[in-house]
Image (tube, helix red, strand yellow):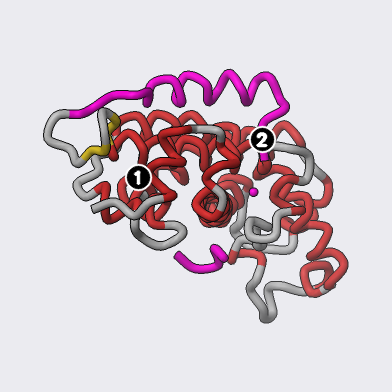
């Protein structure tokens, strides 16, 4: 994954969102899976993903979570990046574009809240054919596996939430930007923003995974510590 070179939860809603997913991937030895002791390596991969996602969404759903992230600031959707006779005036202004980008980063927080349970559910059921390779892999190996498994699921989940958020906000800045573009509506903005937010979310999850791998003891999870401290064979 590109741009992936960490965060605990304080919001009670976010905690409830993820605790079920974390609990569902407990100390289970799965038949036919590589394991150390009585604990499945598949379980270790799921724990790694669950904690990485929990930390990522906790950060991204804070005020200015996307905007302040070193890896997950959302770019302006491509439709706002056009140049030529159609795009004139305000969309050619650097300060306006920065304010618009900041606003859309704030809207993306609603998309992240919708995406969070989708990721949680996927972590519970993800198939891990080679847990050893994932645990011994690069700093974002598990995140890459999950993203490949989920495909466009986050984009599809976020589009309605972002569309609703944009309509409810009825933000003058966004409306002014749309008015400068021929044939563009809020639905198209929501779709474009979902694509950008999808990338940002995966970058943040990958960053959290890398941080956990670099310091397994910080998790206080004996399963992750055992799985990540010693290379698996």
Please name the residue shown 47% across and 37% down the image: 157
Q: Nearer the viewer, residue 60 or 22?
A: 22
Q: In which quarter of the image is residue 177?
A: bottom right
Q: In which quarter of the image is the N terminus?
A: bottom left
Please name the residue shown 23% across and 53% down the image: 233
Q: Name the residue under label 2.
A: 8
Mark 1–mark 2 Cα distance, whole angstroms, equals 24 Å
**Residue 191: x and y, percent?**
53, 50
Residue with the most extreme right position: 95
Q: Which of 86 and 124 is in front in this view?
A: 124
**Residue 45: x and y, percent?**
36, 41
Examine the rendering and report whether any part of residue 121 can be seen. Answer: yes
The numbered dot on residue 150 is 1
**Residue 228: x and y, percent?**
42, 48
**Residue 105: x and y, percent?**
71, 50
Q: How crowded is mark 1: few (under 14 residues within 10 Å), some or many (20 or more)?
A: some
Specify start and end residues of the magenta stretch as a single range: 1-30
In magenta segment, residue 75: no
Is label 1 in a helix, a strand or a loop? helix
Q: Nearer the viewer, residue 163 or 139?
A: 139
Please name the residue shown 46% across and 35% down the image: 50
Query: Height in image: 113 above or below 90?
Result: above
């Amino acid at each position: 994954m590109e741009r992936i070179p960490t965060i605990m939860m304080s919001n009670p809603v976010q905690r409830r969102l993820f605790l079920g997913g974390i609990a569902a991937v407990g100390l289970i030895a799965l038949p036919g899976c590589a394991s150390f002791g009585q604990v499945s390596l598949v379980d270790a991969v799921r724990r790694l993903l669950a904690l990485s996602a929990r930390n990522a969404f906790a950060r991204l759903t804070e005020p200015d979570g996307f905007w302040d992230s070193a890896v997950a600031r959302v770019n302006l959707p491509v439709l706002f990046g056009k140049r030529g006779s159609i795009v004139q005036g305000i969309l050619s202004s650097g300060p306006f574009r920065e304010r618009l980008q900041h606003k859309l980063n704030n809207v993306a927080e609603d998309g992240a809240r919708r995406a969070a349970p989708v990721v949680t559910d996927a972590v519970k059921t993800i198939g891990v054919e080679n847990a050893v390779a994932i645990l011994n892999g690069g700093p974002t190996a598990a995140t890459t596996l999950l993203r490949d498994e989920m495909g466009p699921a986050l984009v599809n989940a976020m589009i309605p939430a972002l569309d609703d958020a944009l309509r409810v906000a009825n933000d003058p800045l966004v409306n002014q930007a749309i008015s400068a573009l021929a044939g563009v509506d809020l639905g198209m903005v929501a779709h474009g923003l979902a694509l950008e937010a999808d990338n940002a979310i995966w970058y943040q999850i990958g960053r959290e995974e890398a941080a956990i791998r670099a310091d397994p003891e910080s998790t206080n999870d004996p399963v992750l510590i055992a799985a990540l401290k010693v290379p698996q064979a």
